């Protein structure tokens, strides 16, 4: 038995910040101090507070050290682990109070969260199946195989109200029910969509890195429910840590008899294999994903027939994303009523969001459905940096829309977001402040969609390109009011005629910004100005004669020699030469340069 456990985040965020070196240094110092038999080092998945990485938590005190550096390790080991004196200066300061150290669960970031999908992330070693089993892992599978009939499983998932967390929000139990006919007589497949491609989204990756066995257990339960014996996890090759931990988890589950033949001593057989995606965003669409697993170019197929009838290798197939599966074992163990007691009438349970953009607490949060956007941003997210005003939040990535300040108090669920022109998507939530240009934001997402379109259908292949060209024209100051009408018309045409969800939802960022921020579009078109000061073609830098001291610093840093003036004389910017890079404004020490 160890007297102390040191949990170090081994998720992608903290790994990129050097957590592997910290783990190595920690083990070295523990050995040097003769503590190998007393202190265990555990590499976990993501804790959620990605902005504070690398993260280290020491138990039993639950001391939360943030932004840990290699040079901090000797002090932590000698003071805390050897002498029992917590190093207060290295703690996450919100946990430090006049009365002592408060629990991490009492901090603003965690206290309004309810972690179901993320319950083991940051808690267990994801590369050790015994730790997963120690947190009731595989108990749900055992219960299903020894106490429940396949139809009982489906009814439980139906009654829970669980909807797909991948974007569309289709009832999970209904999808399983459609695929459940002819058990034992027809080859069927269970697929997991781990091809998370939305800009700013990293929820599924974090679950795979921090709790891979939960996905294996849930897929096996799904296989039993519909009568399938083979599963595939389609995961991005760009997620090397997730891929490695999935490989380890699959090998361990096979070794323990939890995958393969005769699971739990029954006659049920089920196995899972990995398929690596090459990073095509369109392969997040279910039929394109299955086409890619089959070894073909990842392009969508017309529906119907739907995958539950004719999917992978033309066999009945169910496909759910990582977060959806991560809820399944807990629903089985705790019951449908437990899960449906959380959330709203039509959106049950919790939702994981990846908070990014202009927000203090960047990271992963899991909140009950119905939590307001204001609560997520101001309380959990810690608000917007530098006292800036909230302007909009983008949910659903390139498929979603922008939520303006007028809907800051909207309860987040599937139907509410659709009603205001956005969507849940997989769970990316990008926060924007007054310095963001909404026309530029729409252009950014359209550029992404144009690059990621597979090109199979004309509305998406050509239509999104034309939309992007109009947006680019507007940000260049060359747009007309007729362009706005044409842009809106194109949006509705593409939504109605594109083959798959990528094209059908591509206009959402444009439509939502036109709906709520049309005045910004008009300013670009009529006044030839960007109110947020983002679109370079519409900017002009000027020097205030009253503030200029003639120090020449701006002129010396101008890459195009566009600033004229002698020492101790007022300088002037030649607008014909200015390339609007902003170097002069950045270097000026007297606040004499402004952009309009």
Image: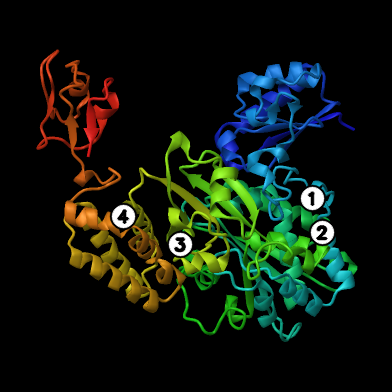
> Of label 3 and label 2, which has the lower sequence position?
2
Where residue 25 appears, x then y in whole percent? Answer: 67, 24
The quadrant where residue 534 appears: top left
> Of label 4 and label 3, which has the lower sequence position?
3
**In front of the other: label 1 or label 3?**
3
Quote the CA–CA distance across marks 2 and 4.
49 Å
Secondary structure at numbered mark 1: helix
> Of label 1 and label 4, which has the lower sequence position?
1
- Relative vertical location of residue 554 with respect to residue 148 in this rendering, above or below: above
> Of label 1 and label 3, which has the lower sequence position?
1
Secondary structure at numbered mark 4: helix
Give the residue at mark 4: 439
Pointer 2 local density, CA inside 10 Å: few below 14, some 14–19, many at least 20? many
Colouring scheme, one of rainbow, by chain, secondary structure, one colour: rainbow
Secondary structure at numbered mark 3: loop
Quote the CA–CA distance across marks 3 and 2.
35 Å
Where residue 258 appears, x then y in whole percent? Answer: 81, 61
- Residue 560 visible from this viewpoint: yes
Give the residue at mark 3: 400
């Amino acid at each position: 038995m160890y007297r102390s456990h040191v949990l170090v985040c081994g998720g992608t965020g903290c790994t990129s910040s050097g957590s592997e070196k910290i783990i190595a240094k920690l083990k070295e110092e523990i050995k040097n101090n003769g503590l190998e038999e007393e202190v265990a080092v555990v590499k976990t998945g993501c804790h959620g507070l990605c902005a504070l990485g690398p993260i280290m938590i020491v138990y039993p005190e639950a001391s939360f050290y943030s932004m840990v550096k290699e040079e901090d390790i000797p002090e932590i080991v000698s003071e805390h682990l050897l002498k029992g004196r917590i190093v207060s200066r290295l703690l996450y300061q919100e946990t430090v109070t006049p009365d002592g150290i408060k629990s991490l669960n009492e901090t603003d970031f965690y206290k309004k969260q309810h972690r179901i999908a993320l319950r083991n992330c940051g808690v267990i070693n994801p590369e050790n199946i015994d730790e997963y089993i120690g947190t009731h892992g595989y108990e749900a599978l055992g219960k299903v195989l020894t106490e429940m009939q396949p139809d009982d499983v489906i009814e439980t998932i139906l009654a829970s109200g669980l909807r797909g967390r991948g974007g569309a929000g289709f009832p999970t139990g209904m999808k399983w029910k459609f695929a459940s006919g002819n058990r034992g007589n027809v080859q069927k497949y269970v697929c997991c969509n781990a091809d998370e491609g939305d800009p700013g989204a990293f929820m599924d990756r974090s679950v795979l890195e921090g709790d891979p066995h939960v996905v294996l257990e849930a897929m096996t339960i799904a296989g039993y429910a519909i009568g399938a014996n083979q599963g595939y996890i389609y995961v991005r090759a760009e997620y090397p840590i997730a891929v490695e931990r999935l490989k380890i988890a699959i090998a361990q589950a096979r070794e323990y008899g939890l995958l393969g033949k005769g699971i739990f001593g029954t006659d049920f057989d089920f196995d899972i294999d990995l398929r690596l995606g090459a990073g095509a965003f369109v392969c997040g669409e279910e039929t394109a994903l299955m086409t890619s697993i089959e070894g073909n170019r990842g392009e969508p197929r017309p529906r119907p027939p739907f995958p539950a009838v004719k999917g992978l290798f033309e066999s009945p197939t169910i496909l759910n994303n990582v977060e959806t599966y991560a809820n399944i074992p807990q629903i089985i163990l705790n019951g449908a009523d437990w899960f449906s007691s959380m959330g709203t009438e039509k959106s049950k349970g919790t939702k994981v969001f990846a908070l990014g953009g202009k927000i203090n607490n960047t990271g992963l949060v899991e909140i009950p459905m119905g939590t307001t956007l204001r609560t997520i941003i101001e309380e959990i997210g810690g608000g917007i940096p530098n006292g800036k005003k909230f302007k909009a939040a983008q949910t659903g990535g390139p498929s979603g829309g922008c939520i303006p300040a007028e809907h800051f108090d909207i309860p987040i669920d599937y139907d509410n977001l659709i009603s205001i022109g956005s969507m849940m998507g997989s769970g990316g939530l990008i926060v924007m402040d007054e310095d963001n240009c909404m026309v530029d934001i729409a252009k950014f997402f359209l550029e992404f969609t144009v690059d990621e379109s597979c090109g199979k259908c004309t509305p998406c292949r050509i239509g999104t390109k034309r939309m992007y060209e109009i947006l680019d024209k507007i940000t260049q100051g060359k747009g007309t009011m007729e362009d706005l009408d044409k842009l809106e018309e194109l949006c509705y045409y593409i939504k109605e005629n594109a083959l798959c969800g990528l094209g059908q939802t591509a206009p959402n960022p444009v439509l939502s910004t036109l709906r709520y921020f049309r005045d910004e579009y008009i300013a670009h078109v009529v006044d030839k100005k960007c109110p947020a000061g983002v679109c370079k073609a519409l900017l002009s830098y000027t020097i205030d004669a009253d503030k200029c001291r003639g120090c020449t610093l701006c002129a010396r840093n101008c890459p195009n020699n566009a600033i004229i003036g002698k020492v101790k004389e007022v300088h002037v910017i030649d607008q014909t030469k200015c390339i609007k890079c902003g170097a002069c404004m950045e270097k000026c020490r007297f606040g004499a340069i402004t952009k309009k």
